[in-house]
Image (cartoon, rainbow, N blue to C red):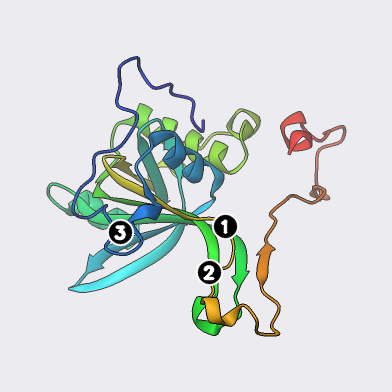
Amino acid sequence: MQGTQQTPPGAATAYARTDRTVPTRSANRASYDKDLVHAILDEGYVCHLGFVRDGAPVVLPTLYGRVGERLYVHGSTGSRPLRMAGQADPGLPVCLTVTHVDALVLARSGFHHSVNYRSVVVHGTAYDVTDPEEKLLALDALVDHVVPGRSRDCRPADKKELAATAVIRLDLDEVSAKLRTGGVNDEPEDYALPHWAGVLPLRKGYEAPVPDPRLAPGTELPGYLMEL
């Protein structure tokens, strides 16, 4: 269900800047463009969810899904951040991040080594999803975020599984993206040094699917996996 909701005519195409979304360093790399933010989020699989527990910061990696201007995170009903979101009033203050590393930038000096990256940071309040229809929508979005089309090709959660699963939502209100592209930024006096410098691109891809040996007879590889 990634990106399935279109921007309504006349809607803002950029997120408003706030004190928390304007970086204090390399502010020229920041972007508030909604399409860019959505693209970075939709390409990722894992986010890092940060919150405060007992006065100490906690950051947990987890899967997520996007439906329009809303992110969903799920887990066991015993998961601390999900339980806290349901108990907190008005909700659980969180910071959610997603990052892609696109290339390693190797400079002549150790100081100027870097990476080309794309990242999104979302600040806001996470709320427990209690409406049954929204919960089902969120769970489908989480499945389809990993493999688009998969929610229509698997058994939906039953009552017992739904009761054991908690979902929280986070609206995309206070959001920024940050990117680095390009090559090496060495000091002028270092260009004559005999050290290799340049960009080492990284690549992400899929290998051939490995079928479960217990597949029902006649089960073929679905088209949405072949397209990957």
Callout 2 secondary element: loop
Q: Position of residue 118 (x, y in %)?
A: 49, 53
Q: Quadrant of residue 167?
A: top left
Residue at the disc numbered 1 = 182
**Precedes in sequence: disc 2 or disc 3:** 3
Which residue is depicted at the point 51% across and 77% down? 187
Query: Front-most of 202 and 225?
Result: 202
Residue at the disc numbered 3 = 81
- How far apart marks 2 and 3 lie (CA) works out to 41 Å
Which residue is depicted at the point 40% across and 30% down? 68
Position above or below: 157 against 209:
above
Tell me if residue 170 can be seen. yes
- In contact (CB < 8 Å): disc 2 and disc 1: yes
Please state which amino acid type lies under the numbered disc 2: Asn
Please state which amino acid type lies under the numbered disc 3: Pro
Q: Nearer the viewer, mark 3 or mark 1?
A: 1
Q: Position of residue 89 (x, y in %)?
A: 12, 49
Residue at the disc numbered 2 = 185
Q: In the orientation shown, which residue stands out farthest toward the left?
A: 89
Position above or below: 142 against 86:
above
